[in-house]
């Protein structure tokens, strides 16, 4: 037995375990539904998953993060973009840095893929530590616009676009 957490790319064989982790993580939240597991399956089926990582402890999956393809227009041109959602850690192991490790590894993987910008809709106390900013997201028209909508340039030296549009993958539009 070891407490060490490993992070690796999710495979098709992980689908059921990932589904269970997402359901368990969101069961206790006030999101009011368990649609996230369904959302992940639809994004996968559409071929819109850019980065899907699992956290493992003792060969058991204890966390998952997905970044999906977005359709981004910035200052009149297209920009490669990825939306972070959902991120899930098994309830008994939350608050120990597993979510943090998954998100940081995911952001690194996006950089390697040449993705330029990432968006997230989430808690303002959590995501800014990774570099997400509501001020950057506010420059983009989106159905998710608001204080919980945040964005980051994956090259921290890149200039912020002045304006544009940010659309999540089509599966998000099929959510109830
Ligand atoms: C959000 C979540 C992925 C964070 O992963 P984690 O491994 O628990 O988080 P970390 O240990 O990396 O970071 C802890 C931080 O997460 C925040 N957090 C969010 N939900 C938390 C929870 N249930 N328990 C502990 N911390 C939580 C805390 O604010 C804490 O912040 P602090 O460092 O300022 O104290 C995880 O708690 C989870 O699965 N929650 C339920 C599902 C969810 O809400 N997902 C996010 C919406 S997409």
Image (cartoon, helix red, strand yellow):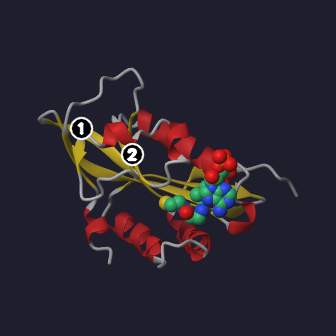
Check the image and report above or below for 122 versus 160. Answer: below
Please, is residue 107 above or below residue 58 in the view?
above
Q: Is residue 87 visible?
A: no
Residue matched to label 1: 79
Horizontally, residue 150 falls left or right of residue 95, namely left
* Quadrant that contains the N terminus: bottom right
- Residue at the front extreme? 147
| Crowdedness near tag 2: few (<14), some (14–19) or many (≥20) residues, C-alpha within 10 Å | many
Whether residue 93 sits left or right of residue 137 in the image: it is right
Along the viewing direction, whichever of 132 and 112 lies nearer the viewer = 132
Q: Toward which corner of the image does residue 170 lie, by quadrant?
A: bottom left
- Residue at mark 2: 150
Q: Secondary structure at mark 1?
A: strand
- Give the mark nearest the N terminus, 1 or 2: 1
Q: Position of residue 108 (x, y in %)?
A: 50, 36
Point out residue 106 in the picture as x, y percentages from the top left corner: 51, 44
- What x and y, as percent, mark residue 48? 33, 57
Q: Residue at x 45, y 70 (%)?
A: 36
**Residue drawn at (25%, 39%) of the image:** 139
Left or right, 103 with reference to 41:
right
Q: Given contact means CB atoms under 8 Å apart, are the residues at marks 1 and 2 in contact?
A: no
Residue 173, image x, y percentages: 26, 68
Q: Quadrant of the C terminus?
A: bottom left
The residue sitting at 29% across, 53% down in the picture is 145
Quarter of the image where ligand 1 sits: bottom right
| Side of 120 relative to 65 (left or right) | left
Q: Is residue 147 among what the camera can see?
A: yes
Q: Is residue 4 above or below residue 44?
A: above
Q: CA distance from mark 1 to mark 2?
A: 16 Å
């Amino acid at each position: 037995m070891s407490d060490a957490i490993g992070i690796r790319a999710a495979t098709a064989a992980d689908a059921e375990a990932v589904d269970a982790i997402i359901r368990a993580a969101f069961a206790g939240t006030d999101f009011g539904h368990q649609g996230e597991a369904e959302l992940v399956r639809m994004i996968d089926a559409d071929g819109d998953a850019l980065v899907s990582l699992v956290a493992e402890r003792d060969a058991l999956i204890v966390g998952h993060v997905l970044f999906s393809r977005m359709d981004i227009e910035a200052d009149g041109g297209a920009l490669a973009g990825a939306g972070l959602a959902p991120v899930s850690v098994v309830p008994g192991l939350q608050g120990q840095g597993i979510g943090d490790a998954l998100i940081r590894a995911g952001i690194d993987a996006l950089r390697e893929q040449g993705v330029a910008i990432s968006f997230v809709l989430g808690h303002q106390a959590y995501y800014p530590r990774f570099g997400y900013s509501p001020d950057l997201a506010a420059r983009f028209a989106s159905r998710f616009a608001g204080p919980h909508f945040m964005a980051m340039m994956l090259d921290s030296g890149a200039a912020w676009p002045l304006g544009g549009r940010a659309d999540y993958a089509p599966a998000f539009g099929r959510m109830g």
